[in-house]
Image (cartoon, rainbow, N blue to C red):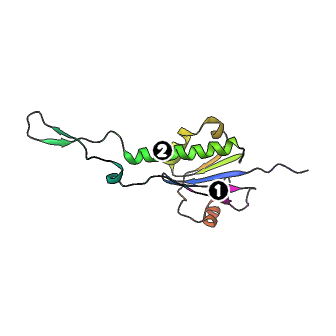
């Protein structure tokens, strides 16, 4: 009797880069599930914000103060990246490319993904590992995840 193959997608991400890996059996090697990695904007503030902050003058005219921006440009870019990554995961779930999902990312990125993943994809999440492994090679990622819920 043959059992259906249970494919696990492992998302290794941080706020600006992600790689979606695939594992066909537990303990088996990892290989890319999609032929490309996702890369978001990670620009310095001077390049992502077009203007300097506005200035507020004291009522008496003695001093001026710079106004802090209401939005953090880096935070906005990270949220946009999480949405793009969630879109890729939704496409994979709709085509039944995987049955299990493991998220490996720093805590803030995990929270961003939790906030944007639809319930049908979130229900496939088997484990969340709060680490940034984006700088490691595939064999090193496999060694780091050995023994975890992967």
Would you name the residue on which mark 1 appears? 21
Q: Position of residue 71 (x, y in %)?
A: 35, 41
Residue lying furthest top in this view?
59
- The mark nearer the N terminus, 2 or 1, is 1
Compared with 99, 135 (above or below) is: below
Q: Nearer the viewer, residue 31 or 51?
A: 51
Q: Residue at x 18, y 42 (%)?
A: 65
Q: Nearer the viewer, mark 2 or mark 1?
A: 2
Q: Residue at x 8, y 40 (%)?
A: 62
Q: Position of residue 150 (x, y in %)?
A: 68, 54
Q: Nearer the viewer, residue 103 or 73?
A: 73
The label on residue 80 is 2
Q: Position of residue 104 (x, y in %)?
A: 58, 52
Instruction: From the image, give the main secondary structure of the stretch colored magenta.
Output: loop
Q: Residue at x 68, y 60 (%)?
A: 30
Q: Residue at x 60, y 46 (%)?
A: 88
What is the span of residues highlighted in magenta in the rendered image? 20-37
The image quarter containing residue 72 is top left
The secondary structure type at the circle numbered 2 is helix
């Amino acid at each position: 009797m043959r059992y259906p193959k249970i494919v696990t997608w492992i998302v290794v991400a941080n706020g600006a880069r992600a790689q979606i890996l695939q594992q066909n059996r537990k303990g088996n090697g990892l290989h890319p599930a999609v032929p490309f990695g996702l890369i978001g904007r990670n620009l310095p503030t001077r390049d992502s914000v077009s203007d300097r902050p506005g200035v507020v003058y004291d009522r008496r005219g003695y001093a001026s103060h710079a106004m802090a921006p209401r939005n953090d440009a880096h935070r906005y870019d990270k949220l946009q990246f999480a949405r793009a990554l969630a879109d890729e995961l939704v496409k994979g779930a709709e085509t039944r490319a995987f049955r299990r999902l493991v998220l490996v990312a720093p805590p803030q990125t995990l929270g961003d993904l939790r906030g944007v993943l639809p319930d049908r994809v979130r229900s496939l999440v088997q484990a969340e590992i709060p680490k940034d492994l984006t700088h490691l090679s595939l064999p090193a990622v496999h060694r780091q995840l050995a023994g975890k819920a992967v």
